[in-house]
Image (cartoon, rainbow, N blue to C red):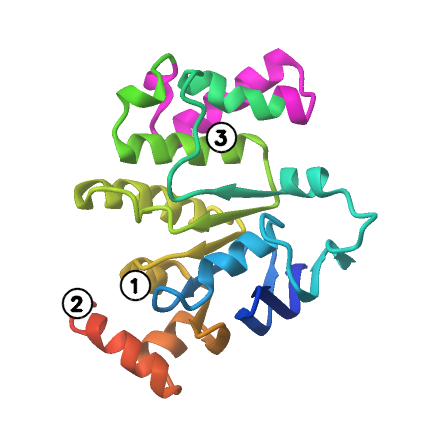
Amino acid sequence: MEELLSVINLQKNFDELEVLKDVSFSVKSREAVTIIGASGSGKSTLLRSINLLERPSGGQILFHGQNIMENSFDVNSYRQKVAMVFQNFNLFNHLNVLQNCLIGQTKVKKIGKDEALDKALYYLEKVGMRQFKDAYPQTLSGGQKQRVAIARALAMEPEIVLFDEPTSALDPEMVQEVLDIMQKLAKEGLTMIVVTHEMQFARDVSDKVIFMDKGIIAEEGSAEDIFAHPKNPRTIQFLSRYRQSFV
């Protein structure tokens, strides 16, 4: 599988606070990578750095071998290929569901209206939200909003989708409907990097699991490596509270 993304010696400081310290990993085409760890370990900052919502303080991020942190790099084009799904949905409340899925295609990618409409409806169908195409975000549940946000990201037909704790703002009964969609997408071969606290999902879906602790990658491996045979004492301690819930 082709290596799409390489993070090399990445650092991120907020003034004196060092949030990411020498982080390195890679993502291959069709790979599902999950990033786990305690709150404050740097997971979301890493994801936001990959999408350049946060500007890294040092290191490199290579996309198809090109350093995205170079001044000449086309960030807008990159964000069309590396889409992001946020924990708080970030839908446009003044647009209905269909319009939310059209605007990026027509305004950013300059896709014709008919083609954009076909794609929007296709991806809304994929996440089970086509029947809500005329609804406005404020009328939807949290789970429905997040499914629309996923459809909006997919409609851009990106090469990688970044999910930043996509279920953390949801009521417990709505979490599974979003995880089910994401699991289906992973099985279909969508390349994804997911920051999550959902350990069962991480274990079931991941090709690679990254455990972060205090701004570093403390351990990295397959789901089997991390969940069944963790080696780092911090990984073992972190996962101990979840182990009895695994089936």
Which amino acid, mark 2? Ser
Whether 125 is drawn above or below 235: the answer is above
Q: How crowded is mark 1: few (under 14 residues within 10 Å), some or many (20 or more)?
A: some
Q: What element carries label 2?
A: loop
Disc ID at residue 152: 3
Does dot 1 land on a helix, a strand or a loop? Answer: helix
Q: Report the magenta residues as a range.
A: 106-133
- Cα distance in 3D space between marks 2 and 3: 33 Å
Describe residue 76's horizontal placement relative to residue 17 as left or right.
right
Question: Which residue is rendered at x = 44% and y = 72% of the image?
Answer: 212
Q: Quadrant of residue 242?
A: bottom left
- Residue highlighted by disc 1: 199
Q: Mark 2 points at which residue?
A: 245
Q: Assign the C terminus to one quadrant of the image.
A: bottom left
From mark 2 to mark 1, how far is it between C-alphas? Answer: 9 Å
Q: Main secondary structure of the magenta part?
A: helix
155 left or right of 41 in image: right
The residue at 50%/58% (across/down) is 45
Q: Is residue 38 above or below residue 132?
A: below
* Residue 235 horizontal/vertical position (percent): 35, 79
* Residue 101, disc: none
Residue type beneath disc 1 = Met
Answer few, some or many: residues within 10 Å of disc 2's Cα (few below 14, many 20 plus, some between 14 and 19). few
Say if 80 sits above or below 12 in the image.
Answer: above
